[in-house]
Image (spheres, helix red, strand yellow):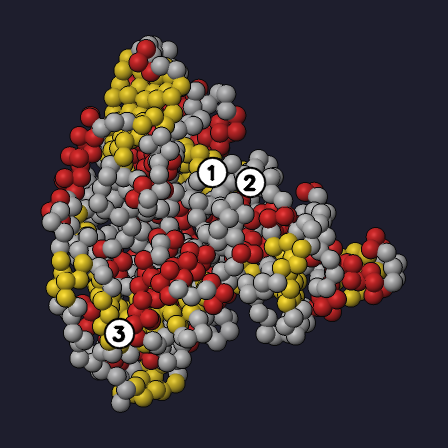
Amino acid sequence: MTSESPSNNLSVDRRELLISAAGGFLFGFTLPGFSRIADAAVLPQATDGSTAINAWIRIGTDERITILVGSSEMGQGVMSGLPQIVAEELMVDWSRVSAEHAPAGAAYVNPVYRSQLTGGSMSVRGYYQALRTAGAAVREMLMSAAARQFGISETDCQAMSGMVINKLTGASISYGKLAPLAAVLPVPTNPVLTPDDSLRLIGKSLTRLDLPAKVNGSAIFGLDVRLPGMVYAAIKHCPVLGGTVAKPPSRPSGTLAVVSLGNAVAVVADNTWKAMRATASLSVSWSLPSTARNVDSSVFLSQAQQLMISGAPAVAQSVGDVTTAPGRLLEMSYYVPYLAHACMEVLNCTVNLTADGCEVWAPTQGPGSVVNTVKAITGLDPQRITVHTTFLGGGLGRKIEQDYIAQAVRIAQAIRRPVKLTWSREEDFGHDQYRPMALARVRATLDAGGNVTGWSNRIVSPSIFAQRGIPLRNGVDGQGVEGAIDLPYAFGSRLVEYVRHPSPVPVGFWRSVGHSINAFVVESAIDELAAAAGIDPLAFRQRLLAGNPRVLAVLNAAASLGGWGTPLPGGRARGLALSVSFGSIVAQVAEISQPVVGSLRVHRVACAIDCGRAINPNSVEAQMQGGIAHGLAAALWGQVTFKGGKASARNFSNYRMLRMREMPRIDVQVIQSGAAIGGTGEPGVPPVAPALANAYARLTGQRVRSLPFFPGARMSEE
Amino acid sequence: MIPITVNGRTYQIEADPTTPLLWVLRDILGLTGTKYGCGIELCGACTVLINGEPEKSCHLELKEVQGRSITTIEGLSLDGSHPLQQAWIEEQVPQCGFCQSGMIMRAAALLREKANPSDVEIDGAIGNVCACGTYQRIRAAIHRAARR
């Protein structure tokens, strides 16, 4: 996904600004040109007498400002970060602001993706300019309405704290009173944005709007949706990938229905536990694919090794001629495994399908895709499909997928009752769309002066895009090579190649996607080269970054924060890594020890990030802490293997997660360079694994080239 | 009919006596703050207090909790005024928030045992899983609540 900031080339004309007045008369228009559109189906229906000034903003008679958020809140703080941008321009106090997930609708698409999709760390980057413009437009409409009320010019009005003040008399009118008047005024085509030096909210660590509901149990995740008359479904997929139902099983006693879903069977009961229990003990006759025995990790590895040698590589990037680069040739191969997403909230979806239409409640990263899924199954007109995005108990890329949505719709279709489908944890692990495995081989030439004269990297990995039928441009999967091309380092000649590994394992987007693979390869290799050159890894990188001051500044900040080069207690070592991803630059220093052989303790990770401009620095810090924790668990223990067509991971018992006692101290420095806004949800992940491996090599002399550090890890109760 | 007391209220539950308390709370009583995470007593998302002691409700059968006093996140305080809830906000702990009910209930039990736990004691007591990695802030929030 693109790493450049779109914020400067957005214009209002892509946005639909929609207006509603109290009492329910609804109309909308597109800027510029004010062409009215009759289709008001996407409008949020305010039932409380409040006025929806446009599709994003609702002003209540009680002076509450509700901002509708097009992105999905999955922990990254978007339900606060996006309203913060609107509230800035709207000139309202943060204490008056609430946020809700927007319904699926054209008004809420991410302007970069042109789709209502949350992924690629693109929420703030995608919506920033549009939301500032929307907030400013509504502020100007409110000022216009006030000027008419006061009988003065707009220039004699000032918007402040949810009121418009008459500068001549000091009188004021609240937004709640102005809203019905403002809603019928023309929308300004080119509203004036607040100058940077007058920003009150953007850049401040405001408290998140979604947290009160998350500490008293009232936050509604997909799993928590309850409808009158609802029944509960659980699911069992064919344990062998590619298998299908040969003969639908009969309905177990004590349950309401059994529904065959092609590669899975669902059982419906009057509570989740009954449905799960019946599903687990269900005896299903499956048709297994003849190729099942080839769905095996040892087969995958030998395929990848073969492809590395004899596959036809597609060139992702080529600069100069690596074959003539002078110096000593070093070759290093790296391997990373398939990974599960392991969201804390298992996949689930609630559907109410009636003669009138279909309503879906889901923890989804793609409400727009949900509409398409429902339409494809039911044939319903999109106007009769309503999608309610709930809070997501983690998304991590898994909840972009539509498999669990489609299943719930099909079950609802079969039983004609409101139904909630909940996957068990075992199904969630066993039927994930896994982070692809990858094999990479770096060949680099090092001259006597410690310069990298040639860098070539061949990556063999399954393609997420190809598996979805999206053609690869020149045979290269862009996400397969992200973080391997366009490196900030001043290498001499460069060649980056991609070989598609046509694996039968379903693969998907996993927090930071290709960067999670390629940063491990690149940053491990850099340290190996530094060691071969006899140069300190920080100094080695500094030399390679001499022409890239912005990246160099982040590297130096992390090194300084992590105490690089300062004395350590005995038995400890530090490792360094850097990654440029999703428009942000992140460098980390990990400090580790090995209390006993075969273990590893991470004491501290120092992290510097330059995301251009941080809307909420505290949220950026939280994303770095979270990304590091996520990356640590994956590097230390994360691995899904396959045998006989079955995934190894069954539950947290054999897919170990990081716990409190393993959590290092994390220090984060947020650098506000003023460059284009970068993403923050994902960039904390990629540097972790190589920082650990580099620290481990310095501590033990052993280079870890294959992840995880500790395969076969298990997690027990205590 | 099995009587159970949840958050000070007594309910007569008509269900299979082996139904896990987790699903009684969620599907029958509609108290959805207590979460399903793993179903095998590992992740702690389903943690509730039984007579003040932390228990994982995914493996407690309905018949086992008959007559005992159950506290869920909804019963910790009605208005979010419990010191732990306030500290959780002040430290801006939750990210996705899914595990946080269980975390807060486990922390509440810890503070009953130890008024001012050290980091080591917190790490030892709380084995709950948070995939968002909010642990550092959880430690800070527990210390903050302990000071109250």
- Classify residue A58 as left or right of residue A366: right
Q: List the residue tagged with mark 2.
A: A6
* N-term-proximal mark, 2 vs 3: 2
Q: Which mark is residue A2?
A: 1
> The disc numbered 1 marks a residue on which chain?
A
For the residue marked with disc 3, what is the amino acid?
A: Val
Quarter of the image where one finds residue A563: top left
* Residues at marks 1 and 2 on the same chain: yes
Q: Look at the picture and state if A640 lies above or below A49.
A: above
Which residue is nearer to you in this view: A600 or A216?
A: A216
What is the secondary structure assignment of the residue under circle 3? Answer: strand
At x 83%, y 63%, the residue is: A148
* N-term-proximal mark, 3 vs 1: 1
Q: List the residue tagged with mark 3.
A: A268
At x 18%, y 31%, the residue is: A305
What is the secondary structure assignment of the residue under circle 1? Answer: loop
For the residue marked with disc 1, what is the amino acid?
A: Thr
